[in-house]
Image (cartoon, grey):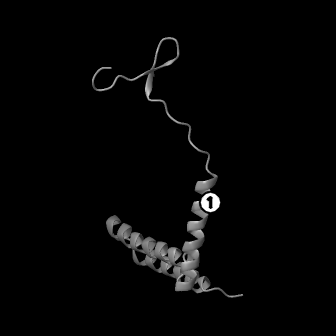
């Protein structure tokens, strides 16, 4: 079964080989800039392939994501309350004096 990414992979491999040959002997900063642009294009293509592009599919994806996050929050272990106080020598917690020194 052919996929849409196969032609892209073949053209990307060809482009890397062509750019490598073209940049032989070029200054390091120019080579770095060229490959940075190429890497940015690959990242954009990867993001497009992961996230759905059709609006009805995109809406379903976001709904599923929100539902998943909501379920994770509900299943999370509740935090223990933190005591606002300092420890005395006996190990008990003493209240922190307020602004009036009480």
> In front here: 84 or 11?
84
Q: In the picture provided, is 84 more to the left or to the right than 13?
A: left
In the displayed orientation, state which residue is furthest to the left.
Answer: 100
Q: In the picture provided, is 60 more to the left or to the right than 34?
A: right
Count of numbered circles on the image: 1
In the displayed orientation, state which residue is furthest to the top.
Answer: 89
Name which residue lies at 61% across and 83% down. Answer: 6
In the displayed orientation, state which residue is furthest to the right.
Answer: 1
Look at the picture and state if 73 lies above or below 37.
Answer: above
> Which picture quadrant has residue 72?
bottom right
- Residue 63 picture location, percent across and down: 57, 73
Within 10 angstroms of label 1, few (less than 14), some, or many (20 or more) residues? few
Look at the picture and state if 77 lies above or below 62.
Answer: above
> Which picture quadrant has residue 50?
bottom right
- Residue 98 picture location, percent across and down: 33, 25
Look at the picture and state if 88 lies above or below 83.
Answer: above
Badge 1 marks a residue whose secondary structure is: helix
- Tell me the quarter of the image containing the C terminus: top left
Q: Which residue is mark 1?
A: 71
Q: In the picture provided, is 2 more to the left or to the right than 87?
A: right
Name which residue lies at 35% across and 69% down. Answer: 33
- Residue 38 picture location, percent across and down: 43, 74
> In front here: 8 or 89?
89
- Tell me the quarter of the image containing the N terminus: bottom right
- Residue 78 picture location, percent across and down: 59, 44
């Amino acid at each position: 079964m052919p996929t849409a990414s196969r032609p892209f992979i073949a053209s990307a491999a060809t482009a890397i080989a062509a750019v490598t040959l073209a940049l032989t002997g070029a200054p390091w900063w120019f080579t770095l800039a060229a490959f940075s642009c190429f890497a940015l294009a690959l990242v954009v293509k990867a993001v497009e392939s992961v996230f759905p592009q059709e609006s009805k599919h995109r809406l379903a994806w976001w709904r599923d994501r929100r539902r998943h996050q909501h379920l994770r929050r509900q299943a999370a272990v509740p935090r223990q309350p933190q005591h606002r106080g300092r420890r005395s020598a006996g190990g008990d917690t003493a209240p922190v004096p307020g602004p009036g020194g009480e």
